[in-house]
Amino acid sequence: VQLQASGGGLVQAGGSLRLSCATSGLNFGNYVMGWFRQAPGKEREFVLAINWSGTIYADSVKGRFTASRDNAKNTVYLQMNSLNPDDTAVYYCAANRRGNARNSADYNYWGQGTQVTVSS
């Protein structure tokens, strides 16, 4: 199983980025796909998770971030709008077969992370 996150970069505050997470070796439709992030010196935190019925969000990104998934391409996307410097982190995608979608410990597979840097 492989998860490959991409799309990170440097963006100014107020800007947007779209991250992608391409998966292989996974029965993609059976997994909840989550995004987490980790800023320097901080613990990894939940961003959002998307399954077949909808998306759940961390309060810090609600109204700014959205997720979508293309089951035909086995890929999940994270659209990030109205970015601010507090969003600077390494962003990880992960796959969860069952369990609490907000809990990183319940995820079975992880991508390598992609850096997002938001300048003020």
Image (tube, rainbow, N blue to C red):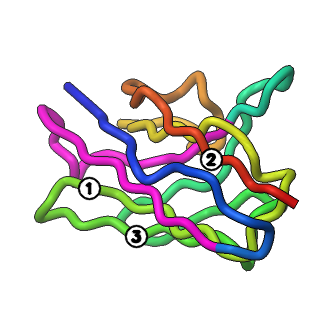
Q: CA distance from mark 2 to mark 1?
A: 19 Å
The amino acid type of the residue labelled 3 equals: Ser
Q: Residues within 10 Å of mark 3 (few under 14, many from 20)?
A: some
> As shown in the figure, which amino acid type bears the numbered disc 2?
Val
Judging depth in this view, the residue of 97 and 41 nearest the camera is 41
Rendering coords of residue 58 (x, y %)? 75, 57
In the image, residue 93 lies at what x, y percent? 46, 41
Judge whether 115 appears above or below 30 on screen: above
> Compared to 68, does 6 lie above or below?
above
Residue placed most toward the observer, 22 or 117: 117
* Residues at circles 2 and 1 in contact by the CB criterion of under 8 Å: no
Q: Quadrant of the N terminus?
A: top left
| Distance between the alpha carbons at the discs numbered 1 and 3 | 9 Å
Residue on which disc 1 sits: 75
Residue at image mark 2: 116
Element class at badge 2: strand
Q: Is residue 57 left or right of residue 110?
A: right
| Residue 93 sits inside the magenta stretch | no
Residue name at image x 15 percent, y 42 percent: 27
Amino acid residing under circle 1: Thr
Which of the image's four quarters has the C terminus?
bottom right
Q: Observer-nearest residue: 90 or 49? A: 90
Residue 68 marker: 3
Residue 5 position, x and y percent, is 38, 42
Work out whether mark 2 precedes mark 1 in sequence or the reverse, and give the earlier one. 1
Neighbours of disc 1 within 10 Å: few (<14), some (14-19), many (20+): some
* Residue segment shown in magenta: 16-37
Q: Nearer the viewer, mark 2 or mark 3?
A: 2
Spatial CA distance of label 2 from label 3 is: 19 Å
